[in-house]
Amino acid sequence: MSLFKRLFTIGKAETNAIVDKLEDPIKMTEQGIRDMKKDLENSLKALAEVKALEIRSKNEIRKDAQRAEDYEKKAILLLKKAADGQLASDEADRLASEALQKKAACEEHVERTSKEQLLLSQNVSKLEGNVKELRSNINSWENELKTLKARVKVASATKNLNRQISEIDSSNTISLLEKMKEKVEQEEALSDAYGSIANKGKSIDDEINSVLQDSTNDKVSDNLAELKAKIASKNKDN
């Protein structure tokens, strides 16, 4: 095997090894991206649900705080009615106490819901961080996948090129060219030989006639020129 062919065989083997090593990472990256997109979808769903709970908790806190304030106002109005004589003192005290108990219950609910809302808010922050990180990783992995696919294309093209070059037998090509050159030279020599034989095949009569034919042609040319001169002279005399 020639050195030229051996070098490209080595290059072909190395390129094949590169392609083999790249195929698995591409499949793994594609699967990883699919898994991460599924995780992202689940995280977005969980984030939406937790945010909905957080919003609901905020609304409940606001409503309970407003109810506690209303109960306090009602208790004050009941005591004012008793002071104005519009309501019996005992009845006013009983109803005002009930209103204050309702107020306390609302405030207790506000406190409990506020703690829950704080936890929900923390969970929302964590989920938002996870979603942001997942999106960043997906973008990073997709870019990596594009790079890997581009490397595979280049490696495959190089492999094919090396294979084609490695299959070229330079010694055979040169041998064919030498044979063609030899054949052309032989044909040219054969043509010269036939020409020489053709010239030698002429008889002495053929050679004489050839020379005389050239002389006859010269005489005809001279006669034609002389005739033209006579015609020109007659025209001049007329």
Image: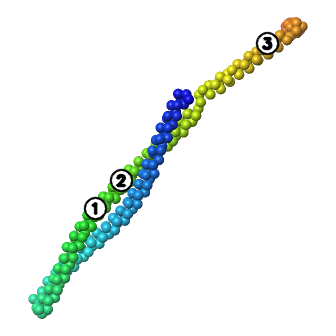
Q: How far apart are marks 1 and 2 (CA)?
A: 17 Å
What SS does tag 1 mark?
Answer: helix
Amino acid type, callout 2 = Ser
Q: Distance between the residues labelled 1 and 3?
A: 105 Å
Q: Which residue occupies 23% across, 67% down?
A: 118
Horizontal and vertical percent for residue 87? 13, 92
For residue 5, which quarter of the picture?
A: top right
Q: Distance between the residues labelled 3 and 2?
A: 88 Å
Q: Which of marks 1 and 2 is nearer the N terminus?
A: 1
Q: Provide the residue designation for mark 3.
A: 196
Horizontal and vertical percent for residue 213? 87, 9
What SS does tag 3 mark?
Answer: helix
Q: Report crowding for label 3: few under 14, some 14 to 19, many 20 or more residues within 10 A (C-alpha).
A: few
Horizontal and vertical percent for residue 231? 88, 9
Q: Provide the residue designation for mark 1.
A: 125
Which corner quadrant holds the C terminus?
top right
For residue 135, which quarter of the picture?
A: bottom left
As displayed, is residue 124 above or below residue 205? below
Q: Which residue occupies 82% across, 14% down?
A: 198
Amino acid type, callout 3 = Ser
